[in-house]
Image: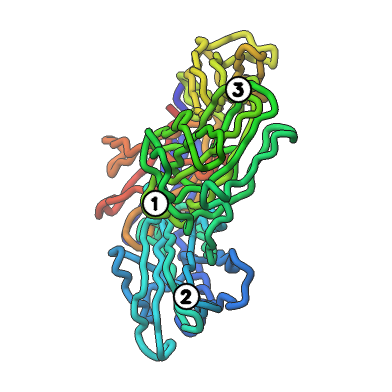
Amino acid sequence: MRIPPFFLKERHLGGAFCLFSILVVFALATTSSALAAPPANDTCAGAVVIPSNATFPYLTPILTNFNEATLTNDPIPSPSCIVGAARGVWYQFTPPQTGTYSFSTGADTATTALDTILGVFTAPNGCASMPAEYACNDDSGAANLRAGLSTNLTGGVNYFIVAWLSHADDENPLGALSLQIRVDRPLVPANDTCASAEVIPANLSFPRMSSIHETILASSESITPSPSCAPGYRSVWFKFTPATTETYILSTGIETATTVFDTMMVLYSTTSDCGALTEVTCSDNGESRGSIFRNLNAGTTYYIAVLDEFKDPVVSETVVQLNVAKSTVPTVVTLPPVSISSTGAVLSGMINPNGLQSRFWFEWGPTTTYNSTSTTRLLFPGVVTITSNTLVTGFSPGATYHYRMAATNILGRVNGLDQTFAYMTNRPTLGNPEQLPSGNFRFTFNANPNQLYSVQSSTNLVNWTTLGLASELPAGSGFFTFTHFGAGSALKRFYRVNAP
């Protein structure tokens, strides 16, 4: 089924915008929105002071209009780590004492800008002269475009920290972008060596979470024997003597506070503490969190070393927490649908086998009794949470359908919570079009959440070019946006939105 298209006409040279449907015509006059005021710390003179006597880690106040920072009228130094930094904002910091300090705009902050740059500068004469670059970072890690850096600072010396947007964020469709900087003075973790391993009590209930450990300054202790699966860096250690013999799960996965992107884990047994370690197993899951599921013997002392697979620490990705649990039924989470169209819906869910071989499937139907079941799939023993999708077809437009993920292993069955989806034929509600400073053209519309909408363009209402799918931001919101990059210089351009 195809929803009748909505048309959006653009006159590039300052003329009126018109919005058409097949039945109704709306005339929209072009208006230029009032420019928002730039942030107070848009200039060096307005730099936000990070208190020297702050309790670390310290989070700066959230800057809610980061992308309103100006591009001119402030002699912001150009960072050496990236070309194309824009809209810098300023902070000022005088460290209380000499040592290592870290600055992050990553997932450990309230920053919503997708791609940030950070620079640290020295300025003996304050804002009276151009600061000199001391450190700079563009992308803090392979999976993180937000900046973060760690560097040694001298106590009592004044530093400026400048944060920029990338040019990609300059035309962000979400509107206002926030910035927050996390400032920390990391210390050597208490369980930095085998001899100082944190003890995991065996007489308490499971699952049992360890303390949270910052690992930037953890040492890469020489381990004998060396881990068999990978070298590993900046280890933290744990000690566990199980009270009963059974299968245990040792994990640094998403259920923990671990932020290290890629951990590895080594399990050792010993008869004389750290003096004679024997490797039991080594876990290296590629680019993911380390985890071990293993039958452990009551009364035997085990040591667990958790290491970072990156040689250099990635600021905002240096925290480790260990979870010790026993094998259980699978953990299942039913997720919202990935996409909905007239020909089918892609259902989604997450599952963790919790150490035991498991099977999982999707159930769906017009009611919560469900009358359709997908093919059952096998999940081998492990402790890694995976996301799985399945395509379902044969439903009617406008009708609401229920679905859930289900799974089972030798310990029992578990059902995910119920979710619903519907393919709707109502027309999207188009918002005001906007021509961006770059010349690219953007418009937004409200429509059915998680549904697919394709965008086509024409200059004559006869020949149409498919540009791609509109983006729903955030997912499940029903708010869609599309930016036509390189729209060209045609005096008139038409757009239409279809639900495939």
Mark 1 and mark 3: span between their CA atoms?
A: 34 Å
Measured from the top left, where is residue 255 in percent x and y?
60, 38
Question: Which label sits in the foreground, 2 or 1?
Answer: 1
* Residue 423 in sight here: no
Residue drawn at the location 50% of the way across and 59% of the way down: 177
Q: Which label was assigned to residue 247?
A: 3
Q: Secondary structure at mark 2?
A: strand
Name the foreground residue: 217 vs 52. Answer: 217
Residue located beneath label 2 in the image: 90
* 2 or 3: mark nearer the eye: 3
* Dot 1: element: loop
343 versus 10 height, above or below = above
Question: Which circle marks residue 424 in the picture?
Answer: none
In the picture, the disc for residue 141 is 1
Secondary-structure class at tag 3:
strand
State the colouring used for the structure image.
rainbow
Residue extending farthest right: 204
Residue depicted at 36% across the width and 63% down the height:
437
Q: Position of residue 408 (x, y in %)?
A: 61, 14
Q: Earlier in the sequence, mark 2 or mark 1?
A: 2
In front: 119, or 63?
119
Residue type pointed to by label 2: Trp
Q: Say which quadrant the C terminus sits in.
A: top left
Q: Where's residue 262, x and y in %?
A: 43, 42
- Work out whether residue 281 can be spotted: yes
Instruction: Name which residue lies at 42% across and 68% down.
Output: 151
Q: Is residue 372 above or below residue 220?
A: above
Query: What amino acid type is highlighted by mark number 1?
Result: Gly
Label 2 vs label 1: CA separation? 23 Å
Q: Residue at x 56, y 18 (%)?
A: 356
